[in-house]
Image: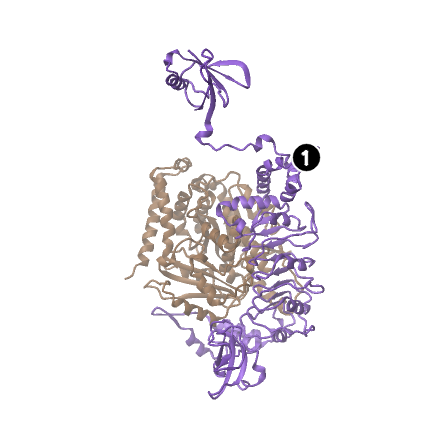
Chain colours: A purple, B brown
Amino acid sequence: MSDTLTADVIGRRVEVNGEHATVRFAGVVPPVAGPWLGVEWDNPERGKHDGSHEGTVYFKCRHPTGGSFIRPNKVNFGTDFLTAIKNRYVLEDGPEEDRKEQIVTIGNKPVETIGFDSIMKQQSEVLDNLKILYIRKVDLSKNLLSSWDEVIHIADQLRHLEVLNVSENKLKFPSGSVLTGTLSALKVLVLNQTGITWAEVLRCAAGCPGLEELYLESNNIFISERPTDVLQTVKLLDLSSNQLIDENQLYLIAHLPRLEQLILSDTGISSLHFPDAGIGCKTSMFPSLKYLVVNDNQISQWSFFNELEKLPSLQALSCLRNPLTKEDKEAETARLLIIASIGQLKTLNKCEILPEERRRAELDYRKAFGNEWKQAGGHKDPEKNRLSEEFLTAHPRYQFLCLKYGAPEDWELKTQQPLMLKNQLLTLKIKYPHQLDQKVLEKQLPGSMTIQKVKGLLSRLLKVPVSDLLLSYESPKKPGREIELENDLKSLQFYSVENGDCLLVRW
Amino acid sequence: MRECLSIHIGQAGIQIGDACWELYCLEHGIQPNSVVLDRQQDQLENAKMEHTNASFDTFFCETRAGKHVPRALFVDLEPTVIDGIRTGQHRSLFHPEQLLSGKEDAANNYARGRYSVGSEVIDLVLERTRKLAEQCGGLQGFLIFRSFGGGTGSGFTSLLMERLTGEYSRKTKLEFSVYPAPRISTAVVEPYNSVLTTHSTTEHTDCTFMVDNEAVYDICHRKLGVECPSHASINRLVVQVVSSITASLRFEGPLNVDLIEFQTNLVPYPRIHFPMTAFAPIVSADKAYHEQFSVSDITTACFESSNQLVKCNPRLGKYMACCLLYRGDVVPKEVNAAIAATKSRHSVQFVDWCPTGFKVGINNWPPMVMPGGDLAKVHRSICMLSNTTAIVEAWARLDHKFDLMYAKRAFLHWYLREGMEEAEFLEAREDLAALERDYEEVGQSF
């Protein structure tokens, strides 16, 4: 480590026993002799102090225990790209040495692994013939790269690079507007957990004219400006786990012409609005968006899905683990409601929506909100149909569903009374035509009660023997008509006695 | 040379076959019309293509017109499912003679599949098999895809396997079987069908890879975010395993694993030939690139029950053999380190009488996923085939269900009507009991 005390070591990324850190200071720390490196750990609890020692501040850390002083020889600066490739794929030691390494023990038995020599030979041929230039995909994640310049330096050598993954490298991005080097063949760029900001994203993207997929998970991104000349070819944008994103920022990326997949999982989003489109109209935002992922968010309003209906090209949606869809019991109902709310949806939560399911969902929706529709002024006669603004906003597709399946009929909307005993009781009036001074009673009797038992009840009430009683009934629906209840063994139901009818007792 | 014939039987076998050939075509760059995709490539790519032409010959037959036709046969006793293939995306991939369907199906009845309805179709199937075998220079063996629980999958397969052993006695026969799920039943008589078919097929198969719908269903639901996994989702995952197992046969690789090598390394006794499959990493497409998976990570994941394709608990059993098939960006040094890490897991116990051999296969061709599917594309993957005594749990479950129904002779008349006798049931059940005892015996210490 001959360059330990030169200034360019500051800002470099290092690794010590599996933990990553950034060098913030290089020099002497009196009273102890010898060179020291002051590092700020990625893990804020790993260190002992915040960069100061015995009162003197040598460097600054963001956390009070984020820093440490380490001897330069204990620190791993990593290797360069080509050496790393050689180390991984090529046999550096002789075959004999490697054979020793191959014997591993499990329990007490040596484990044999067979046949590695030929693989290693083949893989080293890759490098011998300088086929490195044809590398298409590079995964440099979790390394010690410290700046975007270093990445460009590597990528420049790889003319055919299509996929570049530099996740989990804390990179410094240059603040100037011109970045050297274009990655002309690059299609997929993965910058998860790099600490990049939106402005820096746009600057890097300027060097990737053909970029199709951009992954920016867990970067605390705040979308600050609208991309004008960059990102226009991007088809997939992954903004998962960026908690600072809110729906207003999404307007800034709403006009990317080719954006087909947008991943907003775990961003804390609770709503989306497309104010440029009214009820039943399509928005001009996100014109090509086919697949939207909003798992693990805070969606709790059904109006969210009404807004999604405004998207012109939406075909697939993933909406798991949101407050609205959390309950297992409710999952089935939630699924049907979502399907009914978004007409062109073909796949929900990675399950294809078959025509049968869609039909069932839409009919259910139509029935479920039928009473509300009626109360809001709905009517099957289009002349008389005057729906309130409120209803139309809450259920924008309802009119369309009425057109498709017909307006809901009254009999469909009758709510079923639960099958409890009290709902099966008939409320009957009891009159005594021959004894006009007796009060008219009202009693609740089950329909399955036999005439004999009714007579028994009345007999106890009136203190008249059962054999003297003659029963009949009349119904307000058919006034004037009296029906005799002659067969003691039959029930009230048998005689079609209904709620509100009147029993006539004579003796 | 070293060609393999795939035979897909019954609805399960055919649907898995459909997904399987779709994936193979993706991996080899074959278009749905059987023509190899002639991408404009630089020299290196073309050189690689020539190389691979020689190896996908094991699974595809090249016709004079330059088309690549799969070496496969699809058989069902009723036409609906096969019609799906005849009219589907891949209809031009297969020759019409490879898609065989009868008129009347087996109605979830082993007896119909084996005796009554199956016997009418068997000769035609054997004739077509002969034709396909003749096109091969050096046929290695057969890969049979079927389910245990269905009528055709159980009954017809046992009939076919018997006849294949008769005609091609020296050829290996490997099975990919869908085992009836413990808690999700598609047919009440699955236990009958499964026991009967296992009894009659065991002596004719060299190795059976089992897959359980419930395990795969759970994986799809929990790891891939699929709310209600359909057969399509399940099959897409299953074929990744099938592809890993056959990768060495289809791509040139330094560690080639012939069909015979599987047998030799995984099967200690002829009847103990039911390895368990596990696959890693299983990443949802919505979470692509969120996590990096090193060789160590995926190797450890294989030993977790959430990555297994059969519901059983290997911690309760002992391993007899283990095969690790790596695909993609994997180097031997990392494999060694990964295996060393496994040794510190006390839950991995080997039987006393078996040397702790991990057979390792590495194929540098990366795993591919179907576009629009649920899985994310990863740099490297592993498929683990392990012969563990814990799989006896699966058989015990099945036998228990069989016993419950047989004790009351429930549903038996459907089988007796087709000409079967109760004696066959008893024989089959005895055989499975013996299998359970065999497993217990091999697991015992000295």
Horizontally, is A203 left or right of B248 in the view? right
Residue in view at x 65 percent, y 52 percent: A273
Residue A399 visible in the snapshot? yes
Chain for mark 1? A
The reply, left or right, for residue B255 in relation to residue B445 is right
Instruction: Provide residue B78's location: percent of width, then percent of height.
Output: 52, 41
Residue B428 appears anywhere in the view: no
Residue B260: % across, % down: 44, 60
Vertical order, B351 against A428 (above or below): below
Residue A450, quarter of picture: top left
Q: x and y percent of residue B73 in the render?
A: 53, 50
Q: Residues within 10 Å of mark 1 (few under 14, many from 20)?
A: few
* A396 over A480 or under it: above or below: below
Q: Residue at 37% of width from left, 44% of height from top?
A: B401
Residue closer to the observer: A274 or A444? A444
In the picture of the structure, the residue carrying the numbered disc 1 is A385
User: Could you tell me which quadrant the C terminus of chain A lies in?
Assistant: top left
Q: Residue visible at 34% across and 52% down?
A: B436
Q: Secondary structure at mark 1?
A: loop
Q: Which residue appears farthest toward the left when viewing the image?
A: B446
Query: Which one is in front, B101 or B138?
Result: B101
Q: Nearer the viewer, residue B335 or A489?
A: A489
Residue type marked 1: Asn
Which percent across, then down, holds residue A194? 57, 69
